[in-house]
Amino acid sequence: MRADVSAGRMTLTEVHRFPNRPVRVSGTLHWDILGLYRGVLDGLRAAGPAESVGIDSWAVDYGLLDDAGRLIGNPVHYRDARTAGVTARVDPYGVTGVQFLPFNTVNQLLRERLDGAATMLMIPDLLGYWLTGTIGAERTNASTTGLYDVRRRDWAWELIDTLGLPRRIFPAISADGGAALLDDVAEEVGHRTRVVRVASHDTASAVVAVPAETSRFAYISCGTWSLVGVELPAPVLTEESRLANFTNEAGVDGTTRYLRNVMGLWILQECLRVWGNPPLEPLLAEAERVRAKAVVDPDDPAFLPPGDMPARIADHCARTGQRAPEGRAQVVRCILRSLALAYRRAIDDAVRLSGRPVEVVHLVGGGSLNELLCRLTARATGLPVVAGPVEAAALGNALMQARARGLVGDLAEMRDLIRRSAGVRTYEPHGGEDDHGEH
């Protein structure tokens, strides 16, 4: 994406899009990290000269380098089964503040052979290293690992020692101004620029671009995953928060992203794949007209790995004494209604546990284009839902680069710029049959 900032507005243009397809090799699911890096180089070439570049991506996953700086194998995908049997957390919530997920970085590292590893780099840090030759860790992504001390704002060194993980693999958490492209990279892409450390966790970048006017908002960063929460000045590390499985992740300017992961549109995406990838819009139009009483728990572990999601939804309904949805449109409505109710539960819990009142829900990311999901969410929460911007992560990434250039100031100023630049749509919480559903 190419962003241009001028006269108090920002425009975003897509210049290159490439697939992100995990690859299974000898029974292990990997990221095709070299294919992704090639896509980055092609995108830089297509974008042409720029003042700077920023990289954001998913959290949790990482690459390991040897002492010569070479990658040790393709990074393993968090949806791989190697952590499927993890049922108990090893990181103390009062230190790391992260929710328990079997695939958290800490659990993945405990299944690695680390003898030959010199450095661990989270995925955006790995791509930045290949572009610039500079090693470092970015804070928002480090905070997702289960190995970051949210109070000290550094790696949780005592925990790292207790778990027997080598200190040497954890690079310094850096907030530097970035580094220039390596000469051979600049030659390949046709121009020179700097890679700036932005909020490299995509959700952190997306929250920067939430067009909120006050602090009394909840956000849903909605894509393959949905991240649902509030923005706070400090973490919430109570036992009640731990039991509710809320996470405290670092945001911009010392903020805390207090949120819960909800499985998200992954379930719908897998249904579409199983059905042969039919057009989504006609299915959504039909789903608008049908009724589907069944509700599933999007966070059921059965929905995490790739597979036959329509069959898994039917099985979930059988296990919970419900009539399974009939036909594709009912399946789609069941998924979207279930997500809306999961969003309501997460927002209600965030308000209760943090004490932060919420007057509006900002739904950003690709899911903001799904009008049925937005309407169902407004009905379920009883709050207005402001949908957009769609490319929130890219906009937040670009805003941090613009701030590094002195073009914009604090979070309030950045969000004001988003309100002037990005189109949004508001869905009011009118009554309907989806208001009070439970499961």
Image (spheres, rainbow, N blue to C red):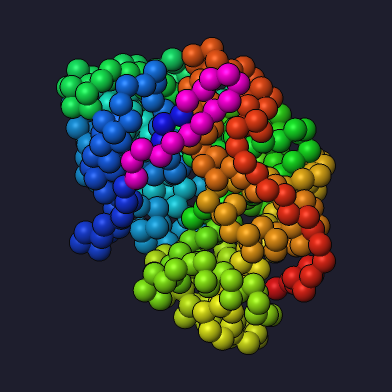
Residue 16 picture location, percent across and down: 33, 41
Please give left or right for residue 382 compared with residue 156 in the image: right
Residue found farthest to the front: 7
**Does residue 60 appear in the picture of this structure?**
yes
Residue 156 in sight: no
Answer above or below: position of 8 versus 344: above
Q: Residue furthest top?
A: 406
Q: Is residue 6 in the magenta section?
A: yes
Rendered location of residue 303, percent (x, y): 49, 68
Count of marks placed on residues: 0
- The foreground one among 308 and 372 is 372
* Side (left or right) of 353 relative to 78: right
Percent from the top left, x then y, of residue 96?
57, 37
- In this view, the residue in front, 117 or 314, is 314
- Quarter holding the N terminus is top left
Q: Residue at x 60, y 21 (%)?
A: 8
- Residue drawn at 77 percent across, 33 percent down: 214
- Which quarter of the figure has residue 321? bottom right
Magenta-tinted stretch:
4-17
Please say if 411 is above or below 256.
Answer: above
Residue 356 forms part of the magenta stretch: no
Instruction: State whether residue 406 is above or below residue 238.
Output: above
Pick the residue in front: 432 or 34: 432
- Judged left or right of residue 63, residue 188 is left
Left/right placement of residue 347 relative to residue 86 reads: right
Compared with 312, 119 (above or below) is: above
Quarter of the view holding residue 439: bottom right
Viewer-nearest residue: 143 or 310: 310
Residue at the image point whose x is 39% and y is 69% from the top:
277
Q: Residue at x 59, y 71 (%)?
A: 285
